[in-house]
Amino acid sequence: MIRNILLLFILGALMMSTDMLAFAKTANVRCVVGDTDKTVGGVVVDEEGKPLYGVSVLIMGTAIGTVSDEQGHFALKADKSGTLCFSCVGREMQQVVYEPGAKNLKIVMPMENQELDRIVVVGYIPEIKKEEEKNKSCGIGSGEEIFAVVEEMPEFPEGNLLEYLARQIKYPTTSLENREEGIVYVSFVIDRSGKVVDTRITKGASVLLDKEALRIVNGMPAWKPGKQRGKVVKVQYTLPIEFKLQAQGK
């Protein structure tokens, strides 16, 4: 009796499994472990293979974008194929066609001007004596859409932007005395009238160096504004400014 019951139970289970498989086949259902990852990502580097920080990355025709981190990495959610645009002050804009799930993209962004990578401000200090060397210790809130890359990027009115800024910037005297150096990353927006607005430090070096970097960016003349699909829009930039010390006579 018990044997017959077990046989009936097994037969019923097999019939249920067969029915479920038939339903799955009819409904075109596939059994998948987890969800398909639609992330698109990679790394942005310069012509020497060094990572680029603060590069604006945008999916063309959308408002979906991000910025590369300190290692040059970026990642975006993308449900369908499209084109990625990469933009950075002083670098040639790049456009790359991608497919959903592509995670190992490597984008090389060469300099626009082969003589200028970033603004480099050199401050000269007295030569360090050997004894001293031994003892030396080692707002954007309006709700209006802001683009990182657009079809018609803003244009600087006075020729080469980096050359203009290099003429304006000064190495703070106190920073020279304190031997402060480093790279300051300044984010700013070119609004619909071409004015420079919403300047802020995204990665600083020191209080005085950050202040000087903001001063020259805020002092820029109005640009020719950018356009997306024929409409004037706001566009955001990230500008690296390097302050570098050098001993006199070198």
Image (tube, rainbow, N blue to C red):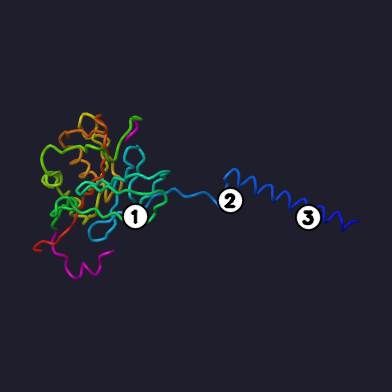
- State the separation of the CA atoms marked 3 and 2: 24 Å
Q: Nearer the viewer, residue 6 or 71?
A: 6
- At which x and y percent is residue 130? 18, 70
Label 3 amino acid? Ile
127 within the magenta span: yes
Taking the spot 36% from the left edge, 30% from the top edge, the residue there is: 143
Select label 3 or label 1 by which is in front: 3
Q: Which residues are magenta?
A: 125-141
Label 1 amino acid? Leu
- Relative to 137, is 219 on the left or the right? left
Whichever of labels 2 and 1 marks the residue nearer the N terminus, that label is 2
- State the separation of the CA atoms marked 2 and 1: 29 Å
What element does badge 3 sit on?
Answer: helix
- Relative to 133, is 164 on the left or the right? left
Q: Which mark is residue 31?
A: 2
Taking the spot 21% from the left edge, 46% from the top edge, the residue there is: 89
What element does badge 2 sit on?
Answer: loop
- State the separation of the CA atoms marked 3 and 1: 52 Å
How packed mark 1 is, by other alpha carbons closer than 10 Å (few <14, some 14-19, many 20 or more), is: some
Q: Does any portion of residue 145 appear in the rendered image?
A: yes
Taking the spot 82% from the left edge, 53% from the top edge, the residue there is: 8
Whichever of labels 3 and 2 marks the residue nearer the N terminus, that label is 3
Report the quarter where the C terminus lies: bottom left
Label 2 amino acid? Cys
- At which x and y percent is residue 2? 89, 56
